[in-house]
Image (cartoon, rainbow, N blue to C red):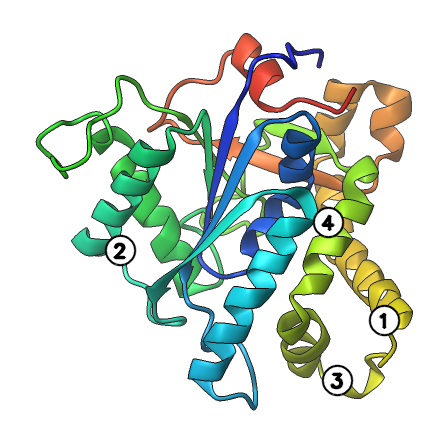
Amino acid sequence: MATDHNQPLRLLILGAHPDDAEYYAGGLASIYRRLGHAVRMVSMTDGSAGHHAMDPKALAQIRRREAQQSADQIGAEYEIWDFPDGQLQPTLTLRHRVIREIRLFRPDLVLTHRTYDYHPDHRAAGQAVQDASFLVRVPLVVPDVPALPKDPVVGFLPDLFTKPKALSADVVLDITDQLDSIIRMLACHQSQVFEWLPYLDGVLDQVPSDTAGRVAWVRRWYTAQIRPRADRYRRELVAAYGQERGGRIELAEVYEISQYGALLDDAARQRLFPTTP
């Protein structure tokens, strides 16, 4: 998986919520930044519904601060749009916002959710990006921003859902060496990983109060959450990394490539999904 690290790349992650980018693609984002590439993470919603007790307006401000703190861990950009959390729809307004974002940032690689996902906001985000993928090259659509000469590669963030269709593992990436970076980012989302998600899981009373205990907590939670990815896509990991390494990888990111963006040939695969030196 050797690549030309001197060629600057631009990664755009279009998630539905603050922390989606880190949870689903924090490993690749960390690799990009370690190699000096540009990373921009976007939350299409304001995150205002993701709590069991907090006022939505106050929560939206907290999540904005947490997202920026997370991005600062790797030196990435982070932007949160103002669409209400839990109410995202693949409207023309959202599609045009996505087209503008892609045109202005000019990414080599765009990542977003699949339209087969548990959360309606995730599905709406994926649909909006899918609908925008070709139109970024059409000058008379959103004419106030110059159209791109070619499409970026568009990939779908990993999930384990199988109906109506499981994710196709077009790219598998060992993120073992990026774990510390991912945990630092996720730990910045305190309202989520130490409050809201434990509340949903019924374990809020088990969350440690000290910093070290909380970091250990989120590390255990995250690794338990994503370890099934490697188990499901073991064959692809072995094909990519060889039997010895591929057989023992426990932490992986897996991406499906959209047919609506640029094609991913072998050269583009090595360039857009690098490993660290």
- Amino acid type of disc 4? Ile
- Reading the chain from its start, which is encountered first: label 3 or label 2? 2
Question: Do the residues under discs 1 and 4 have CB atoms within 8 angstroms?
Answer: no
Q: Horizontal placement of 105 versus 150: left or right?
A: right
Residue at the disc numbered 1: 211
Residue position marked by numbered label 4 in the rendering: 182
Q: Secondary structure at mark 1?
A: helix
> Label 4 crowding class (10 Å Cα cut-off): few <14, some 14-19, many 20+?
many
Examine the rendered structure and indicate whether residue 46 appears above or below residue 157: below
Q: Which badge, 1 or 3, is on the more N-terminal residue?
A: 3
Residue 169 % position (x, y): 59, 32
The mark nearer the N terminus, 4 or 2, is 2
Vertical side of 2 occupied by 61: above or below? below
Residue corresponding to mark 2: 90
Looking at the rendered structure, which numbered label has been put on residue 204? 3
Which label lies toward us, 4 or 3? 4
Residue at image position (64%, 35%) is 28
Q: Is residue 272 left or right of residue 35?
A: left
Q: Residues within 10 Å of mark 1 (few under 14, many from 20)?
A: few
Marks 4 and 2, how far apart at CA: 29 Å
Above or below, comparing residue 138 to residue 179 in the picture: above
Q: Name the one closer to the observer, 45 or 144.
A: 144
Q: Quadrant of the N terminus?
A: top right
Q: Residue at x 65, y 14 (%)?
A: 5
